[in-house]
Image (cartoon, rainbow, N blue to C red):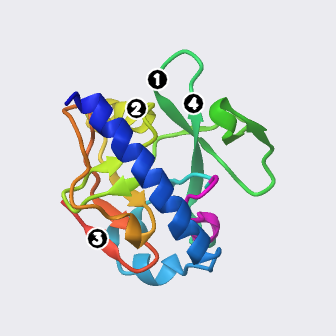
Amino acid sequence: MDLSIEKKNQRKLAAKKRLLIHQSFNNRFVDFNKLLQKNKWFKEGKIIASFLSIKTEISTKSLNQLIWRSKKTLCLPVIKHDSDLLSFHRYIKTDKLIVGRFGVMEPDNNSECLPDVMFVPCLAFDLFGYRLGYGGGYYDKTLAYFNSLKNTFTVVGLAYDNQKVDEVIHDDLDQKLNYILTEKQLYKIL
């Protein structure tokens, strides 16, 4: 079977599963502080890329508040109009957000940042460090580009613990994560 068809099928199943997980989770508060405070990469990271969760994604609200409380620069992804790459723009609570491509809210400023730590959304993840995204390739292309710059950064998938699968279907373009953060634990990959 064609790898792209396999990925598409895995994406459909993962989206259905995440919907059920999200409904049963019922927007409970997740204290990411307990899971992150011991990690050198989080303590030392000054610029942290996160995202504003949409639909059935695990909520990033407490994570983003933790980043601000820790006196770090929070930046959010912006889909560049002229490429398949993401840029990350500083975001403070008083900044205006606008609707970007795919209906995702983005900061309305030109304060571009290069993150030390990047939290990325997942439809599914495995313990080999692969994540299943939405199929656009934006994060994978951006991570590959950052790696080509020899930028040192930590990549953390953010998901519900029950989104874990035995194996995410992947190819050479898929970039590996360093960690996966769930409501239950932090999985170290690399």
Q: Which is nearer the N-term, disc 2 or disc 4? A: 4
Which residues are the magenta region? 54-68
Q: Which is nearer the N-term, disc 3 or disc 4? A: 4
Q: Amino acid at mark 4?
A: Ile
Looking at the picture, does residue 33 appear above or below residue 138? below
Separation of residues labelled 2 and 3 (CA atoms): 23 Å
Q: Residues within 10 Å of mark 2 (few under 14, many from 20)?
A: some
Separation of residues labelled 2 and 1 (CA atoms): 8 Å
Instruction: Give the quadrant of residue 169.
Output: top left
Residue 54 in percent (x, y) is at 63, 52
For the residues bearing labels 3 and 4, Cβ distance under 8 angstroms: no
Q: Residues within 10 Å of mark 3 (few under 14, many from 20)?
A: some
Q: Secondary structure at mark 1?
A: loop
For the residues bearing labels 2 and 1, Cβ distance under 8 angstroms: yes
For the residues bearing labels 4 and 1, Cβ distance under 8 angstroms: no
Separation of residues labelled 3 and 4 (CA atoms): 28 Å
Q: Secondary structure at mark 2?
A: loop
Residue 96 in percent (x, y) is at 81, 44
Q: Amino acid at mark 2?
A: Gly
Question: Closest to the observer: 183 or 74?
Answer: 183
What residue would you read off at disc 2? 137
Question: Closest to the observer: 188 or 4?
Answer: 4
Separation of residues labelled 2 and 4 (CA atoms): 11 Å
Q: Amino acid at mark 3?
A: Tyr
Q: Which mark is residue 109?
A: none
Q: Secondary structure at mark 4?
A: strand
Q: Is residue 35 left or right of residue 78?
A: left
Residue visible at 56% across and 25% down in the picture: 80
Q: Which is nearer the N-term, disc 4 or disc 1? A: 4
Q: Which mark is residue 187?
A: 3
What residue would you read off at disc 1? 84
Q: Which mark is residue 79?
A: 4
